[in-house]
Image (tube, rainbow, N blue to C red):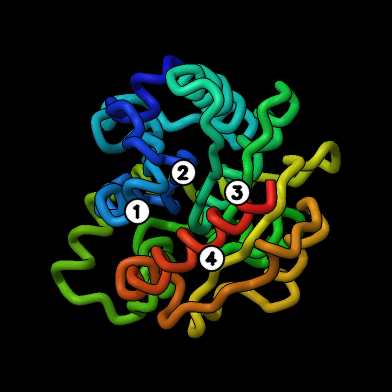
Amino acid sequence: MADSASWVPPTPEPDPGCRARLYCFPHAGGASGTYRAWTTELRPDIQVCPVLLPGRDTRVGEPVPPDMTTLATTAAHALAAHLDTAPGLAYAVFGHSLGAITAYETARRLAARGRPPLLLIASGSEAPDRVAASARERHLLPDDAFLTEVARLGGSADAGPHEAELLRALLPRLRADYTIAETYTHVPGAPPDCPIVVYAGTEDTSVDESGLRAWARLGRPDPPASGVRRFPGGHLYLDDARPFVLRALRRDVGAVLDAS
C-alpha cells in the first residue's frame, strides 16, 4: 500500500514560518515513537513527519517489504504524494541505522522524479557500500543467537528479563528488518542530489570512522552542512542525546536553507 496516508501520520498545515519538513525513518525493529517526541521541539521552523513503515505502528498487521528495493520504491511513491500536500515547502530526510539506508535509497528515487531533498541526515550507519560482509548473516541465526546479537548492537549484551521479553516480542519484525539490511547491496548510480550530514554516537562500536566519512562522496558538497557529527552514547543514542540532536538538526537544516 503506497498511499501517503498510510506512510505518514495525518499532518496538520505547517506552522506559519515553517521552512521545511523532515521525514524520519526508523531503525531496524523501530517505530515512530522517537520521532513523534521531536514534533513539538522542532516547531515552528521544521515540521517533523515520522515515516510509518509496514509491520509497525498503525500498520502492524501489514507484511514488511521483502527487500530494500521494494521498500524504498514504495516509500518514494508515498512521500511524493505527501509532498504535494504542501507544494513549494522544502524537505529533508533523516534515518537511523537501517533507516539511514532506507532514507538514502528513498531520496535517490525522489531525486530521479525531479524532487530531491534539501538535505539527507544519515545516523548510526556507515555508507551504503561499506556494510561489513561479516554482518550479513545475522538474520539467518537461530532465534536466541539472533536476539543476543540484536541486544549487543543496542549496547545491552546482558539484557535483563524485561528487555529480553520485549526483544522476543519484536522478533518477527526484527528478523524481517535485518533481512532487508543484510541482503541489501548498493547499486552505483545517480546520487540523491543533496548534501549529506552524518550523525553517530561517540561509543557506537558498530560503525567505523572511515565508513561514516565515506558518505561524503555520495552527497553534493555543501560546506554549510557536511561532515560527521558525534553525540554522547552508543548505537541507540537518539533518546539520551535528544537535546544535542535536535539542536544539530535545527542548525544543519537551517544552514542549508539559508544557503539555498
Question: In this rendering, would 186 be left or right of 86?
Answer: right
Please say if the residues under marks 2 and 3 sit with CB atoms less than 8 Å apart. Answer: no
Q: Can you tell which of label 3 and label 4 is closer to the viewer?
A: 3
> Given the image, on which type of amino acid does mark 2 rest?
Leu
Q: How far across and how far down the image is residue 89, in percent?
A: 52, 31
Q: How far across and how far down the image is residue 44, in percent?
A: 33, 46
State the CA–CA distance, disc 1 to disc 4: 21 Å
Label 4, on which residue?
A: 124
In this view, the residue farthest toward the left is 162
Q: How many dots with numbers?
A: 4
Label 1, on which residue?
A: 42
- Which class describes the residues within 10 Å of circle 3: few (<14), some (14-19), or many (20+)? some
On residue 257, which mark appears?
3
Q: Can you tell which of label 4 and label 2 is closer to the viewer?
A: 2
State the CA–CA distance, disc 3 to disc 4: 24 Å
Vertical placement of 23 versus 243: above or below?
above
The local secondary structure at tag 4 comes to loop
- Which class describes the residues within 10 Å of circle 4: few (<14), some (14-19), or many (20+)? many
Label 2, on which residue?
A: 22
State the CA–CA distance, disc 2 to disc 1: 10 Å
